Image (cartoon, rainbow, N blue to C red):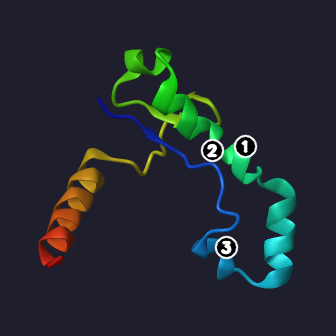
Amino acid sequence: FAVSLHPGNLIGTDVMRRVPGPLERLIKRFRPSPEEGAQTTLLCATSEEVLAHRGGYYSVMELAEPSAQATPELGAALWERSEAWIAEVP
């Protein structure tokens, strides 16, 4: 059983540490808190309802349509590249 989800929050991550200060402050005004951002992850980990949507994509606490860029071809390429990276780990 697997689903994918938008993590909901980048505040406090290494990604946001690389954003210039003024832009980071602006983004923080519109981004959810870490607690709010975690809600979709918790939903997917605990909800019986999610079991009916195996392979689904969740965003902001609900089943959502993935980006048009999320193609099977791109997914296969990511899988292959991930396998290659893992093979390099001692």
Does 3 sit above or below residue 25? above
Q: Residue 77 location, x and y as percent?
A: 22, 60
Kind of residue indicated by mark 3:
Met
The residue that disc 2 covers is 38
Q: Earlier in the sequence, mark 1 or mark 3?
A: 3
Determine the residue positioned at 79% across, 74% down: 24
- The dot on residue 16 is 3
Label 2 to label 1: alpha-carbon separation: 5 Å
Nearer mark to the viewer, of 3 and 2: 2
Secondary structure under badge 2? loop
Left or right: where 57 falls relative to 43? left
Kind of residue indicated by mark 1:
Glu
Determine the residue positioned at 34% across, 25% down: 54
Q: Quadrant of the N terminus?
A: top left
The total of numbered circles placed on residues is 3
Contact check, label 2 and label 1, Cβ < 8 Å: yes
The residue that disc 1 covers is 36
Left or right: where 47 falls relative to 56? right
Left or right: where 41 falls relative to 81? right
